[in-house]
């Protein structure tokens, strides 16, 4: 073999890999696969069900009704001039997108072990496709929200979104990044020891209560003990939910500091997740 | 040009269960790692021998594998179950990474460890072609360009708009193989996926494999237990044994070596048989009294014990290593009259020109009379036929004929 041949290797397969070698070029090469996975997820979820995508409507509606009954009627939490039902629907719609991304990606390695064990493609395609296909579910649920929004508007409620609505795409992105980042971390950490999986199940439902979903942040500041209120306030998810309601319903508070803090945390967690995920993908199949 | 190069590839696996016991090892490994020291468990580990008792918590599924593959070469990888073939394939296809060592490649590798990876039962045939193709590394454009060809090859045109869950299992496999067969990577890694479908489809699949390797000059790494297809497709082979390369060389030599790993008895050996004494006629021993060479005289000798005076027929049949009966000598063919006397008889015989090409065969012995069997040994001895008077044919299409005969030839007569 001639010496110049030595330098022309297209790629190497070895156990060592730099932590920051994220192989984004490869991900781009497989973009068609990403699209096909998204298409697969969307078209196959409700095959052979009678109500089909209607199921997307039912879950947030019922949850909002229950929340309104429990928190607003029984617990008499005030939502200001906003109808409590709409207030809850807004929070739940946003929260659902986050949890769908998070729980959908948190078992990536385990649930795809069959396919990952047979063929190579950049593993990160899988969680990315989950996040994107959930966007469609989110879109449908947002549509319901808009329908009810119009309904309450016709009823004479004083509702108006504000200029911050321009930040809407960034909020979506932050939710996706947070869900994806956390999901990838959990997924990587549960390939060998599965203890965390048990935790994830109930932690997600508990997390909702400290993320200001069924109540405004101002109520938390007023009624909760200081350290809990602080926890709720610095929870990036609270910031997202609160911001989401602020731009759609013009209720609650918004601060650029909180916004950038959340953006930073989301991007940071996402990058951390990506690095951990990339480290794990190389040989997880031996321990899964 | 060298297109792929494996340097010191090793793979270590842990034996037993994942549990609290593994946690202490993991913590220890982590502790060594942050201090910049080497993994302490890399020094231990048993040789990959499935049947021996485990002495260590770790096993080396592969140990120091080195090889190079030239562009356009078709390399066969053979070995017994658990020799490390699949582990090597998994590393080559980047499903898992080696514990130590590095594989360098100049081309894109596509692997076929299974047909139909990622098929979704709810999607139609056409949708699954796209999905499966993309999983295997094709782009949408490439698939669209080949869609008609794929559908045609699979022979499932009628069902292409129907969900795959309605397919018969054979149809699913045909469709899946059709997609895989139209991959165009620089290096194709194939596990034993040819053993699918009906006879007609298998033939088609092997033909396609030959096209890929010979016609298109693509590099193929092929793992199989079917020696005939390995010999058919490959020019070179690697024999793995207990996680290491046992030999690496010309496909015929390696295949022969593989087949002889476990053979106990060989030519020139003397077989003393244990026969229950209550049989009225039995073979006491069998011995080959000549050298075993292709085209040369093959002579043998029996000892046969009989209780009475009796007329018998004897037969010897030759089988290939795949247990295919190919050649028989039988005293009845030529109305030979052999009459045993009471006690121990010696029968000897010979074949003037042994019509078997060099390689490994097994011999079975029969003694009886007409349709009655007195004594029978399905596989009594394995023989290795060596080079001799008949020259081996190196033309690919002709080299798989085990039986060859002398003939008279004339030219311009």
Image (cartoon, helix red, strand yellow):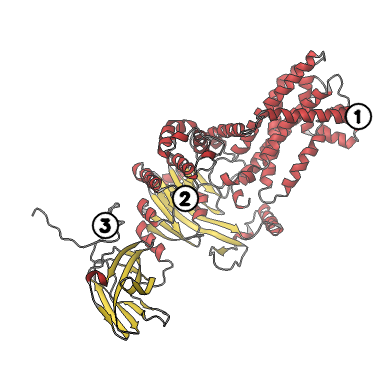
Q: Quadrant of the C terminus of chain B?
A: bottom left
Q: Which mark is residue A222?
A: 1
10 Å neighbourhood of mark 2: few (<14), some, or many (≥20)?
Answer: many
The answer to whether the residues at label 1 and label 2 have Cβ atoms under 8 Å apart is: no
Q: Which mark is residue B393?
A: 3
Name the quadrant containing residue B271.
bottom left
Q: CA distance from mark 1 to mark 3?
A: 94 Å
Return the residue nearer the eye: B274 or B223.
B274
Residue B392 shows in the view: yes
| Residue B51: image location, x then y, percent | 54, 66
Residue at left 41%, top 79%?
A: B275
Camera-nearest label, 1 or 3: 3
Q: CA distance from mark 3 to mark 2?
A: 29 Å
Question: What chain is tagged by disc 1?
Answer: A
Question: What chain is tagged by disc 2?
Answer: B
Residue at the bottom extreme of this rendering: B343
Vertical relation: A227 (above or below) B396:
above
Q: CA distance from mark 1 to mark 2?
A: 66 Å
Question: What chain is tagged by disc 3?
Answer: B
Q: Which mark is residue B191?
A: 2
Q: In the picture provided, is B349 more to the left or to the right than A2?
A: left
10 Å neighbourhood of mark 1: few (<14), some, or many (≥20)?
Answer: few
Residue A254 shows in the view: no
| Residue A129: image location, x then y, percent | 61, 34
- Label 3 vs 2, first from the N-terminus: 2
Name the quadrant containing residue A26.
top right
Name the quadrant containing residue B147.
top left
């Amino acid at each position: 073999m001639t010496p110049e041949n030595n330098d022309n290797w297209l790629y190497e397969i070895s156990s060592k890999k730099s932590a920051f070698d994220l192989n984004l070029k490869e991900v781009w090469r497989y973009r068609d696969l990403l699209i096909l996975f998204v298409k697969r997820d969307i078209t196959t979820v409700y095959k052979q069900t009678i109500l089909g995508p209607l199921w997307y409507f039912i879950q947030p509606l019922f949850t909002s009704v229950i929340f309104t009954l429990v928190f607003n009627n029984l617990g008499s939490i005030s939502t200001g001039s906003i109808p409590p039902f709409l207030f809850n629907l807004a929070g739940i719609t946003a929260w659902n997108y986050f949890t769908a991304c998070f729980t959908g990606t948190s078992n990536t390695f385990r649930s795809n072990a069959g396919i990952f064990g047979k063929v190579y493609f950049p593993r990160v395609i899988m969680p990315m496709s989950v996040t994107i296909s959930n966007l469609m579910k989110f879109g449908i649920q947002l549509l319901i929200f808009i329908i009810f929004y119009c309904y309450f508007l016709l009823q004479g409620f004083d509702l108006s979104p504000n200029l911050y609505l321009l930040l809407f795409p960034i909020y979506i992105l932050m939710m996706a990044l947070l869900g994806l980042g956390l999901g990838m971390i959990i997924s990587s950490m549960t390939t060998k020891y599965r203890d965390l999986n048990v935790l994830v199940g109930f932690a997600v439902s508990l997390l909702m209560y400290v993320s200001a979903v069924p109540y405004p942040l101002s109520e938390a500041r007023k009624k909760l003990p200081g350290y809990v209120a602080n926890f709720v306030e610095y929870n990036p998810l609270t910031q997202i939910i609160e911001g989401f309601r602020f731009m759609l319903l013009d209720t609650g508070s918004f601060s650029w500091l909180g916004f950038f803090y959340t953006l930073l945390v989301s991007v940071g967690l996402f990058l951390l997740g990506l690095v951990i995920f990339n480290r794990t993908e190389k040989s997880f199949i031996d321990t899964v | 040009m060298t297109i792929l190069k494996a340097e010191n590839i090793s793979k270590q696996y842990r034996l037993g269960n994942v549990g609290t016991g593994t946690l202490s090892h993991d913590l220890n490994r982590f502790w060594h790692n942050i201090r910049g020291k080497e993994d302490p468990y890399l020094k231990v580990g048993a040789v990959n021998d499935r049947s021996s008792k485990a002495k260590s918590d770790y096993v080396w599924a592969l140990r120091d594998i080195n090889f190079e593959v030239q562009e356009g070469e078709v390399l066969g990888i053979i070995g017994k179950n658990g020799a490390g073939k699949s582990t090597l394939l998994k590393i080559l296809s980047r499903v898992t990474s080696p514990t130590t060592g590095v594989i360098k490649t100049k081309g894109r590798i596509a692997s076929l460890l299974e047909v139909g990876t990622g098929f979704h039962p709810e999607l139609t045939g056409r949708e699954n072609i796209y999905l499966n193709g993309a999983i295997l590394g094709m782009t949408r454009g490439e698939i669209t360009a080949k869609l008609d060809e794929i559908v045609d090859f699979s022979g499932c045109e009628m069902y292409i708009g129907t969900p795959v869950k309605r397919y018969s299992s054979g149809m699913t496999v045909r469709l899946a193989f059709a997609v895989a067969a139209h991959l165009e990577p620089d290096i194709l890694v194939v596990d034993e996926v040819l053993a699918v479908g009906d006879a007609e489809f298998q033939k088609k699949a092997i033909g396609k494999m030959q096209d890929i390797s010979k016609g298109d000059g693509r590099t193929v790494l092929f793992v199989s237990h079917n020696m005939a297809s390995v010999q058919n497709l490959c020019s070179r082979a690697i024999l793995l044994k207990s996680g290491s390369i046992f030999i690496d060389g010309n496909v015929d030599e390696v295949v022969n070596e593989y087949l002889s790993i476990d053979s106990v008895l060989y030519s020139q050996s003397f077989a003393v048989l244990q026969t229950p004494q209550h049989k009225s006629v039995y073979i006491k021993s069998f011995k080959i009294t000549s050298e075993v060479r292709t085209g040369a005289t093959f002579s043998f000798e029996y000892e046969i014990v009989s209780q009475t005076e009796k007329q018998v027929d004897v037969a010897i049949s030759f089988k290939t290593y795949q247990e295919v009966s190919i050649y028989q000598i039988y005293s009845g063919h030529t109305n030979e009259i052999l009459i045993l006397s009471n006690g121990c008889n010696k029968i000897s015989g010979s074949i003037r020109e042994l019509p078997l090409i060099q390689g490994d065969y097994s011999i079975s012995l029969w003694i009886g009379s007409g349709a009655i069997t007195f004594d029978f040994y399905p596989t009594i001895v394995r023989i290795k036929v060596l080079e001799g008077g008949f020259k081996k044919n190196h033309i690919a299409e002709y080299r798989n004929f085990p039986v060859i005969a002398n003939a008279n030839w004339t030219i311009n007569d």
